[in-house]
Amino acid sequence: MDQSHSSQSYEAENSVPFFADMTLDLAEAHDIAETPEPMQRTILQTPQPTHSKEFPNLPSLDECNTIVSNPTDASADSTASTPQRIFIQPSSSLTSKPSPMQLEIQEIRATDSSPSFPPPTQYHNPQDDNIESSFVDRDMGRLSANPRVVRGPRSTQRRRRQWPKDVSWAMSFFIIVPVTLLFPIWFAAKNTDADAVWIATATSPRLATLHTIFWGLGVAILLSRLLYRTAGGGDGDDARHFASQLLLSSAPISVSVFIMLIVAIKVLTPHAFWPYAIIPAWYLARDLYLFRRWKMTATTPGGRQAFFQALACMTLDILSRSLRRNPLWRMIVGVVLVQFVVILLWRMSLLSAIQSQSPIWILMALMGGKWATGTVARFLSLIACGGISNWFAEQSSLVEEMNQMQQKKGASNRGFRDEDEQMIEFTDITSTNTGASNDNSVDMPEAYRTVDASAYKSVLQNEGMEDDDFEDEIIEDEEDGRFGVRPTVDFPTMSARQKQQRRTRHSRTTVKQFMMAGLSVNFGSIAKCGLLGGLAQLVWSQIRKIDHARAAFRRGSMQGMDIGGGPDDRFSRPASSVPGVFNKIMLQINFFAREFVRNHSDMAMSYVADYQLSYTRAAQDVALLLDEAGVEPIIHDDISTHMSACVGGSVSGLIVLLTGAVLTHQRNRNASHAPDSAIVLDMLMAFYFCYTLIFTVMEPLRASIKAVYVCFAQHPDSLSQAFPLIFHRLTRMSQSNLS
């Protein structure tokens, strides 16, 4: 009693609650003034196996009171024996490394100024350590207020090895392209009488052409930043809308530029007006024909342009969500620089071939440069199509999960209504209005309206999912803070563990994963598409024009071109029913042309990136898919390719106009004997080189829009929640083509 009295007096003086009694229930111990003395207990330590659970005995109340009342007695007596330990220490096998949360709690206890008491002994479960450690590994439920999920280490499961596709085309590329680009230079240097004639032709007199390529490179980098560095979601809507309006304005600008080019050739170089003026005149006629066709086939004035603007904004939004803007933009700039180096080499090869005046070398230089630049551009197509395909696949899975939830909810609602006898007569009516019974419902739920951009994740392996976009944004915000700009979003400081994880994930982004696949497994398919994809697109366009002309001439109607030569095709009639040898030859040409388009369409890049198929197999599967879904006429009426050409033509034409004026001024000032044909040839070469650079920047957008059509044919409901307006338009157009 004396000890208990002394402990009570100690509590009264220090106003510290006493929590030594742990055996009472909280309801019983409420409002009890004095703590009753517990029964005397003896401390027994029984050995237990390490794998079993420990039940440590509770300490004696007298011993606790002794420690509290005389905290320095044991330490004052140096000769006294070591006091017996009150708490049983857990075995070494059950002792785990303290977690970050435990360390933080210990620091708080160490800095607390209140008297420290021994912690009460509690029941210890070894499984709790595992639960706690796994919970700490997840950043303790985001205690740092970081909204981004930190993924765990990548899986060690082996993936199935992918063997390279179209190996023969890859080997042909590495053999033919260097030969066709380097041999004309070597041949011109060896067989020219004057030692420095070909070098002068490639450098000094043509510096204006070289400057034009550098100007085109600067415009290409600025255009790539304008298009592909917009933020995903609603934050980048204004920037994407401005970019799409700029693309639309390039169509009338290109017409004006081509007219100015024709006039400039006539005024500056009158002796070379024929035949060099045919090239800008052909571009002008093509644009005017397409503008007229847009106006005649559009249901509403400006309908095609408005749909292209909405489609371009949607495609850029999907790219920023799926591939992330910073790595995508850096990759595009890197590929544009590679294209710039290839164009410089192509320029020297072509000038050397022209200097040699050999048609064979000129043809070889043209073919080698076209194949090389086309392959570099198709490399961007592969990455863009892969990002679009991943986003559509993820959206398809989300829509399926939502439909399953609606079906379960509708089934439960129907069961509840069946049990209600008063509402039984309305059961059939209300069941038809549920989301489960209407599979084609396109109502946007609240979850999709408020969903964040991070919800749209890729469907690749987990080891390539993360991106370094978040770290770049933190760096940009820190730089803005140094310059006095207040950031709009306050990002918390990343922990050392998060920084280490981002360093380990720095080389495993989605963009880099597609790049590695494009340089290894799919390079043969890219090379094949770079050589034959554009030609197949041109043949397909001409076949469609012939079909429309025949339909108008015969006053018939055609639902669409069947690439495989279906039974509804007018050209697929038996040759015996068409009199004349000429018609038989035309039927054979038509058959081979359609077969060529079916096997080499550039829309195959979607399946090449998504399923890593060979180029021919992917083209055949895509052609069959588009024909069955009724999307093929929509792709033919798409204006994305022409809008990309208008952007390239307008920018290149304006640059070449300045180049032509500079060349003419230098010739007149230096009294040079350079003919007009040489100046016009320089202008045309500069135009095509700049056009290639600008079109390379536009290639991801053009390929992504085509990938949207292919993915819509494969996953028709994927756009219903994220982009309902475009979903309704594409659905209506595809259904009208099938009817």
Image (cartoon, rainbow, N blue to C red):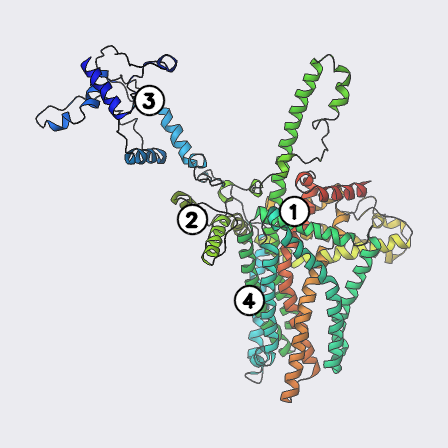
Q: Residue 146, percent across and down?
A: 47, 41
Residue of label 4 = 341
Residue of label 1 = 618
Residue at the left extreme, as displayed: 79
Give, as a three-letter code, the residue at label 3.
His
Residue of label 3 = 124
Q: Looking at the image, which residue is at 74% across and 55% down?
A: 639
Report, in whole angstroms, how far the alpha carbon at label 1 lies from the one at label 4. 31 Å
Q: Which image quadrant: the N terminus? A: top left
Q: Residue 297, percent across and down?
A: 83, 53
Q: Looking at the image, which residue is at 78% across and 52% down?
A: 303
Choose mark 3 or mark 4, whichever is in front. 3
- Of label 3 and label 4, which has the lower sequence position? 3
Report, in whole angstroms, how far the alpha carbon at label 3 lies from the one at label 1. 60 Å
Choose mark 1 or mark 2, whichever is in front. 2
Within 10 Å of the Cα at label 2, are there few (<14), some (14-19), or many (20+) other Cα atoms? few
Asked whether the beta carbons under mark 3 and mark 4 sit within 8 Å of each other, the answer is: no
Report, in whole angstroms, how far the alpha carbon at label 3 lies from the one at label 2. 38 Å
Q: Secondary structure at mark 1?
A: helix
Q: What is the quadrant of residue 431 in the picture?
A: top right
Q: Secondary structure at mark 3?
A: loop
